[in-house]
Image: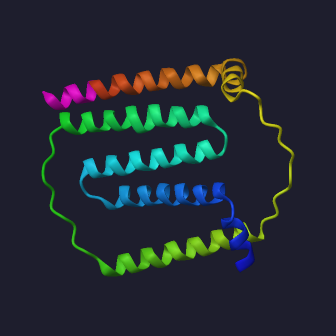
């Protein structure tokens, strides 16, 4: 077991993956732990940047670029603007419940144990995958040939959601 850990950590890519994964998980945990919305947005942006690092390690540079540009940049800025443009009333802090925290910790550890056991016992078939010479070209070809209808439906859905959010914001203002 120790030999496997040493051989795993002997590669720089594995160490970088481990660090990016820990940073992404840490950012997600901080996001659900913080109470101030600005801190939550910062934690989410940190998670998005960590995921972009994982994409770089997977030789998906285009996805990493899109992750940084759209999610870490645009979505985080949009969330901050949304926070600044809305009114917030101070809410009373919920009382601490130590029994709930202990039960949550036990549940998390049990879930981790189950997942660890399942992954260790799983048999993954080995496949030879020949990566495309140009990832961006392949994504574009697949997106605009095989998946053009879902792509257009998502764009319509996002437009409708955006218009609905504007209408709801205008109603709250009045």
Dividing the picture into quadrants, the one containing residue 143 is top right
Q: Position of residue 129 (x, y in %)?
A: 83, 42
Q: Position of residue 140 (x, y in %)?
A: 66, 21
Q: Residue at x 57, y 71 (%)?
A: 111
Dividing the picture into quadrants, the one containing residue 149 is top right
Q: Residue at x 44, y 76 (%)?
A: 105
45 left or right of 5? left
Q: Residue at x 41, y 61 (%)?
A: 29
**Magenta segment:** 167-174
Q: Residue at x 60, y 31 (%)?
A: 62
The quadrant of the image that shows the C terminus is top left
146 left or right of 24? right
Up-down relation of residue 8 to residue 113 (above or below): above
Residue toward you, 168 or 118: 118
Up-down relation of residue 33 to residue 136 (above or below): below
Does the image show residue 1? no
Does the image show residue 153? yes
The majority secondary structure of the magenta stretch comes to: helix
The quadrant of the image that shows the N terminus is bottom right
Residue toward you, 117 or 140: 140
């Amino acid at each position: 077991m120790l030999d496997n850990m040493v051989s795993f950590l002997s590669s720089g890519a594995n160490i970088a993956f481990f660090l990016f994964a820990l940073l992404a998980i840490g950012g997600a945990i901080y996001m659900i732990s913080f109470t101030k919305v600005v801190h939550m947005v910062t934690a989410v942006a940190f998670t998005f940047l960590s995921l972009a690092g994982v994409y770089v390690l997977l030789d998906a540079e285009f996805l990493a670029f899109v992750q940084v540009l759209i999610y870490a940049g645009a979505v985080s800025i949009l969330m901050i603007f949304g926070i600044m443009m809305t009114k917030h009333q101070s809410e009373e802090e919920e009382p601490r419940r130590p029994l709930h925290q202990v039960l949550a910790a036990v549940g998390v550890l049990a879930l981790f144990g189950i997942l660890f056991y399942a992954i260790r016992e799983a048999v993954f078939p080995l496949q030879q995958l020949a990566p495309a010479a140009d990832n961006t070209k392949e994504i574009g070809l697949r997106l605009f040939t095989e998946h053009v209808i879902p792509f257009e439906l998502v764009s319509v859905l996002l437009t409708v959601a955006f218009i609905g959010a504007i209408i709801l914001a205008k109603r709250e203002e009045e």
